[in-house]
Image (spheres, grey):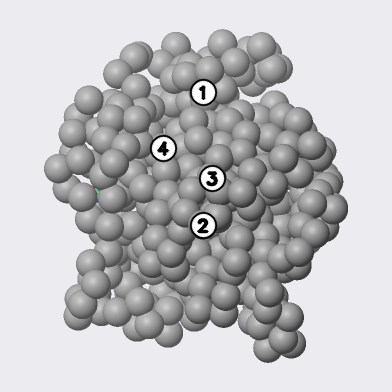
Amino acid sequence: MKIKVLCNDSQRFAEIKRAAVEKDPEAEVSGGGWRVEELPAFIDGGGPDVLIIDQATADCLDTLEILIQRRPDIDVLLISTETSVDFLMRAMRANVREVLPMTAISVPLQEAIGRIRQKRNHLLGMRGDGKVLAFISCKGGSGATFIAANVAYALAAERKQRVALIDLNLQFGDAAMFVSDQIPPSNVAEVAREIHRLDASFLSSAMLEVESGFHVLASPDDPSSSPDVKREHVEAIIRLARSKYDFVVVDVARTLDAITLQALDMADLIFPVVQLTLPFVRDSKRLISVFRSLDYHQDQIHLVVNRYQKGGEISLTDIERTVGLKVFMTLPNSYQAAATSVNLGIPIIKGRRTDPLSKELIDMAHAIVPAAEEEATRGGWLSRVFS
Ligand SMILES: Nc1ncnc2c1ncn2[C@@H]1O[C@H](COP(=O)(O)OP(=O)(O)OP(=O)(O)O)[C@@H](O)[C@H]1O
Ligand SMILES: [Mg+2]
């Protein structure tokens, strides 16, 4: 576990570090001084698994609430002299994991670290049945493929998850090109044609290995071969991929045909991607009402606003009101960096890591891991019938 200790007293830092390492000898503990305004910087660029804030006071709670919402995967522990009910309630509402006393910190700190480790091991143990994430554009060109490809890459590169990216835009798919300049060895249509051979090694040989742990099953080169792919092929491919990978990221076409619905049906989380202009908003309303009519659960649908600029004519509240869903994530407009990434076939997170868009995409990958785990614990959801 990576533990970051924010502490303005070097002796206390040494004491906290000693206690943490004694409990978890493999922990990487780093430290630094802190002020409330600097808190957001401590979760940037990956961030720790556990953030310990020494001598925390009530004025850091509002900032923490926002940070924890952005990065629910980070467990935050506060060490504080504050014991008032009001403080504890606010800390709880901010989703702080525990508030520990200032004096005799070692034992309570070690106990808290033990509980966090137990929780994390439990989540790790739930792997094996990968989570399916489906990305769909509410209107052509909204950025669904770009986001799917880069989030898939981020899950593999930043969260060390095994990730399969499957391109189900069978006519004009381009997901593989967003993350690699290599020619894919095979594609969805070729796998479908030989579906009787489908097993782990056949699937793996059909996929392009972008990096270790990140593989892409490309869409066919020839749009006329798309009718070869049937609903049951998609089901078999996703089911197998799910058993082999932690995350199966599916880029689906906007046409709500049997292929798309099969993928959406198998998705744990669905990410409709929209931009804040009227035609996009109108189509997102239509798409989300289709999801409702298909009985997709509200909690599964994670609306992403791409190329978001504050102060536009349509606000986040407008779209939330129109479609009846909270916005899960906004991603900034970053034309040059996105265009270069796509032109070179290098994930933006790899090529332009410091770009604001990369930062948000990394945050999105971090937020997806706990969201997917939560969805999995909610139990299997009804499979809808498509005919
Ligand atoms: N946040 C962003 N800022 C700037 N450019 C972006 C951003 N997101 C995506 N783009 C650009 O928009 C282009 C279109 O994106 P993409 O192909 O992902 O859209 P799509 O929703 O998948 O479209 P389609 O419905 O045609 O499949 C990409 O080539 C990319 O360069
Ligand atoms: Mg696309």
Do the residues bearing badges 2 and 3 touch, measured as CB atoms within 8 Å? Answer: no
At horizontal 53% and vertical 68% (from top left) the residue drawn is: 64
Q: Is mark 2 within 8 Å of ligand 1?
A: no
* Secondary element at image label 2: loop
Q: To which residue does mark 3 refer?
A: 31
Numbered tag placed on residue 149 in the rendering: 4
Of circles 2 and 3, the one toward us is 2
At horizontal 44% and vertical 20% (from top left) the residue drawn is: 210
Look at label 4 and name its amino acid: Ala
Numbered tag placed on residue 215 in the rendering: 1
- The answer to which of marks 4 and 1 sits earlier in the sequence is 4
Do the residues bearing badges 1 and 3 touch, measured as CB atoms within 8 Å? Answer: no
From the top left corner, tell me how far across and down residue 124 is, in percent.
76, 39
How far apart in space, not on screen, are marks 4 and 3 (Cα)? 34 Å
Q: Residues within 10 Å of mark 1 (few under 14, many from 20)?
A: many
How far apart in space, not on screen, are marks 1 and 2 (Cα)? 44 Å
Do the residues bearing badges 1 and 2 touch, measured as CB atoms within 8 Å? Answer: no
Look at label 2 and name its amino acid: Asn
Which image quarter is the N terminus in?
top right
Name which quarter of the figure residue 69 lies in: bottom right
* Secondary element at image label 3: strand
How far apart in space, not on screen, are marks 4 and 2 (Cα)? 41 Å
Of circles 4 and 3, the one toward us is 3
Do the residues bearing badges 4 and 2 touch, measured as CB atoms within 8 Å? Answer: no
